Image (spheres, grey):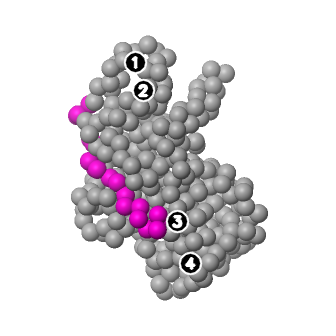
């Protein structure tokens, strides 16, 4: 594998360009003189192997970033585990295998911090992978992501393919999914607090005890990290990407309530699952390479709320 890699003058295919990560990466790559390739779900179904292989061979990308996936929060993962494991296994297998067939120079697969064991020692290092049992509420999704990571490792070992993996912590920001049944915690709380202000509600109910600790990364910081890794990392092992800062769901709810202007009570529903009680990444590897996140949680949440107002609230009002 080469030690140095540049995105300049490359054809870069972003699989999942319409999602939160993909759209952030597209914004980031406008600073490069590279050609960005993308194709809509309507024109290319990534779960269809032959179609994916034909498209990649025809378009001949130099670089592939695999950010396409079926994603969702605890409720969605519990409700649709078959969809999560099947769709993600198909997407990953087709894009990774097709990229090798098409002679792609470098591929970056987007993993997830949820693939680490539920009881992993904190902060979680990359070598904790496969060292214990997974969190049951997102097990199907996690198993699929582990398979994708192992595919990249296997292609690198067997074929000397420059296929790498990034493991982000919890993401939020522009382009997030605002769906009452499928959202992650930040957009779910933004919707709850905004709706409570609009309706004049005196109480908001939040899933779980509020005690779990989470690490959150603004999506544009992740896009910057992915570009950094594409140009500076060629190893077999995954690379954690996070801030190293933790916040409880309780305090996160208070922060979002303050941003939205909600003054009522917040009640934590302990009858709902918490998921993993603590999940913080050890970011020593990427920090050692020279990258750190730039957006504070306070600034990122404000930007996320403003984007929600512009994209969802204003459209609903119109």
> What numbered label is drawn on residue 257?
2
Residue 192 showing in the rendered view: no
Residue under pointer 4: 162
| Pick the front one: 247 or 58 | 247
Give the magenta-colored segment's residue range. 269-288
> Which tag, 1 or 2, sits closer to the chain's start?
2
How far apart, in angstroms, are the residues tagged by discs 1 and 3?
A: 41 Å
- Quadrant where the N terminus is found in the figure: bottom right
How far apart, in angstroms, are the residues tagged by discs 1 and 2?
A: 7 Å
**In magenta segment, residue 302:** no
Marks 2 & 3, CB-CB < 8 Å contact = no
- Type of secondary structure dominating the magenta stretch: loop
Task: Provide residue 258's location: percent of width, then percent of height.
Answer: 44, 26
How far apart, in angstroms, are the residues tagged by discs 4 and 1?
A: 51 Å
Residue 293 showing in the rendered view: yes
How far apart, in angstroms, are the residues tagged by discs 3 and 4?
A: 20 Å
**In magenta segment, residue 286:** yes
Residue under pointer 1: 263
Where disc 4 sits, the SS reads loop
Q: Residue furthest top?
A: 200
Q: Residues within 10 Å of mark 4 (few under 14, many from 20)?
A: many
> What numbered label is drawn on residue 289?
none
> Which tag, 2 or 3, sits closer to the chain's start?
2
| Pick the front one: 164 or 13 | 164
> Which tag, 3 or 4, sits closer to the chain's start?
4
> Which tag, 4 or 2, sits closer to the chain's start?
4
| Pick the front one: 304 or 199 | 304
> Which tag, 1 or 3, sits closer to the chain's start?
1
Where disc 1 sits, the SS reads loop
- Quadrant where the C terminus is found in the figure: top right
Q: Say if 149 sits above or below 217 in the image.
A: below
């Amino acid at each position: 594998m080469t030690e140095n890699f540049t995105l300049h003058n490359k054809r870069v295919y972003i699989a999942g360009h319409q999602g939160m990560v993909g759209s952030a990466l597209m914004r980031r790559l406008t600073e490069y003189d590279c050609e960005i390739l993308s194709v809509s779900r309507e024109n290319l179904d990534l779960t269809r192997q032959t179609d994916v292989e034909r498209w990649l061979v025809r378009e001949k990308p130099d670089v592939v970033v695999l950010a396409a996936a079926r994603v969702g929060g605890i409720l969605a993962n519990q409700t649709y585990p078959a969809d999560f494991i099947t769709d993600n296994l198909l997407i990953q297998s087709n894009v990774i295998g097709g990229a090798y067939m098409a002679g792609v120079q470098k591929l970056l697969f987007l993993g997830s911090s949820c693939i680490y064991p539920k009881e992993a020692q904190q902060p979680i290092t990359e070598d904790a992978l496969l060292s214990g049992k997974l969190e049951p509420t997102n097990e199907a999704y996690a198993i699929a992501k582990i398979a994708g990571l192992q595919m990249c490792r296997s292609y690198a070992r067997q074929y000397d393919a420059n296929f790498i993996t990034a493991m982000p912590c919890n993401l939020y920001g522009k382009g997030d999914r605002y769906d009452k049944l499928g959202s992650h915690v930040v957009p779910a709380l933004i919707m709850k607090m905004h709706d409570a202000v609009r309706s004049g509600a005196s109480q908001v109910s939040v899933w779980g005890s509020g005690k779990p600790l989470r690490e959150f990364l603004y999506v544009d910081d992740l896009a910057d990290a992915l570009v950094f890794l594409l140009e500076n990392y060629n190893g077999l092992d995954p690379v954690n990407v996070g801030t190293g800062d933790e916040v409880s769901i309780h305090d996160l709810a208070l922060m979002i309530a303050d941003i939205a202007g909600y003054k009522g009570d917040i009640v934590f529903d302990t009858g709902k699952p918490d998921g993993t009680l603590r999940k913080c990444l050890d970011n020593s590897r990427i920090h050692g390479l020279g990258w750190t996140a730039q957006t504070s949680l306070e600034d990122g949440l404000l930007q996320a709320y403003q984007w929600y107002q512009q994209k969802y609230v204003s459209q609903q009002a119109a």
